[in-house]
Amino acid sequence: MDKILIVKIGGKLINDSHVLHRFLKSFAKIKTKKILIHGGGNQVTKMCKKLNLDIKIRNGRRITSIQDLEVATMIYAGSLNKTLVTKLQSFNCNSIGLSGADANLIESVKRPVKEIDYGLVGDIKKINSIFLKNLIDENLTPVICSITHDKNGQLLNTNADTISSEIAISLSKYYIVNLIYCHEKNGVLSNPNDDNSTFGQLNEKEFSNYLKLNIISNGMIPKLTNSFYALNNGVKSVKIAGQSLDEINIKSTTITN
Amino acid sequence: MDKILIVKIGGKLINDSHVLHRFLKSFAKIKTKKILIHGGGNQVTKMCKKLNLDIKIRNGRRITSIQDLEVATMIYAGSLNKTLVTKLQSFNCNSIGLSGADANLIESVKRPVKEIDYGLVGDIKKINSIFLKNLIDENLTPVICSITHDKNGQLLNTNADTISSEIAISLSKYYIVNLIYCHEKNGVLSNPNDDNSTFGQLNEKEFSNYLKLNIISNGMIPKLTNSFYALNNGVKSVKIAGQSLDEINIKSTTITN
């Protein structure tokens, strides 16, 4: 089987145009088959503020209104996705931007209302992995944003970390999949204020211990949960890394079962 | 050779969500291979106003600033393109949204500055027709927006009528291409205030005569120029039609050489 590298970017890595430029230049140079998956950094929040839209947070999670979804679709699938694609093209990486609606790539279902109605948020149901495989085998690099749809005409906002693990799992029947989550910190830190406190490795048991001891910050939970889920379902390796692909061997945490 | 239908939509057809819904439902039912190409209606202008961006017009043509381009990319490639795609998916038409940057579909060059600097506007240089053919032959329906790029990292705003004729021409080596421009009027009218004054047919000579006599409005010039250009370069048929695909045989103008 061929190898494929799936890289997820988000947060401050996207907000800083110089960091992003350098990152994309390194990413474009990677010789193996590859996929880029992105969140939106703080661009959606900034645009919502410009448009005077209220931002609703419940239990630390954003509620997606119709207006928020429109802004998210404009930024994720529009300006940001196409900026990433054209930049990669300029580095001779033939990329193609996709949302979950395109070719029915990611079918999701609106999150059921239990205690909280998260609004127009989608939980993933199905990945069209054969379509993705066809693109990849034509030497295209998919650039996937965090907008999905329910196949009934409704777009839905979906967590980019989860999209990354689900896509990684769905492609593990065709490829040896390596997944890397890149963000502004150098991997998983034992002290969030010390960029040199990166764990070299982390397994599931250590994770739950460190979590109880408040050594790992809550913000890392979704990434780590997704990492273990991917490893337990066919993905070959998962790393949580920083803003530089070139330093990945020294500044990243390898997640193990 | 297989037949392919290329449909361009724009203007008020896009602004009115009910008209658009009905249109997409009819479009989805078309059995032959097909492509949808869209402008943005008045959505970009509305968003620019919301964001307090000045709109600059010179010689009746919009000047595209960096901010305008960002808004155009958000709307054309983002919210509008993905809304069209998810709606078509809900009508069981497996569609895929694309800008000119995706898979290097449409390479353009910033319009050279002569008397006027139109800003970030792209003139088309090259269409990646083989990529488009591969998608179409996999039974996908491309939905193409009017954002292109220069392959050096710059997105560019490009006229959707021109994109339609260039794509139609580039595909005429693989398919028998029929091109339809759909807009809010019932084809080309001899009296812009009378919706029943549709020309049944119009050739190039008649067009230039009617233009001199002020019978055809200036707003129709780009569509008609593109129509004749397409017909003279391999496209089988061109129609200028109204808002309803179901009434196309009674409410449209067939363009002839």
Image (cartoon, coloured by chain):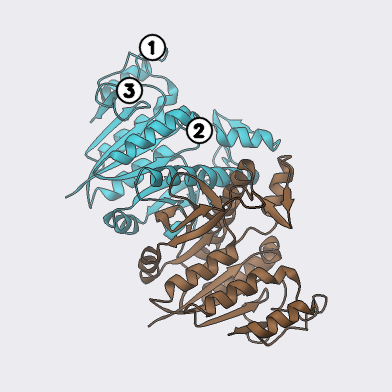
Chain colours: A brown, B cyan
Quarter of the image for the C terminus of chain A: give it.
bottom right
Q: Is residue A251 visible?
A: no
Identify the residue position indicated by label 1 in the image. B194
- Categorize mark 2 by other alpha carbons within 10 Å: few (<14), some (14-19), many (20+): some
Measured as percent of width and height from the top left, residue A202 is found at: 66, 85
- Categorize mark 3 by other alpha carbons within 10 Å: few (<14), some (14-19), many (20+): few
Q: Is residue B61 visible?
A: yes
Label 1 or label 3, whichever lies nearer to me, is 1
Q: Chain of mark 2?
A: B
Q: Chain of mark 3?
A: B
Mark 2 vs mark 3: tell me if same chain.
Answer: yes
- Quadrant of residue A65 within the rendered picture: top right
Q: Nearer the viewer, residue A50 or A17?
A: A50
At label 2, the amino acid type is: Gly
Q: Tell me the CA gap for discs 1 and 2.
A: 22 Å
Image mark for residue B41: 2
Measured as percent of width and height from the top left, residue B23 is found at: 38, 33
- Quadrant of residue A179 within the rendered picture: bottom right
Label 3 near label 2: C-beta < 8 Å? no
Which residue is outermost to the right? A193
Image mark for residue B208: 3
Measured as percent of width and height from the top left, residue B184 is found at: 42, 25
User: Could you tell which of marks 1 and 3 lies nearer the N-terminus?
Assistant: 1
Residue at 29% in and 57% down? B138
Helix, strand or loop under label 2: loop
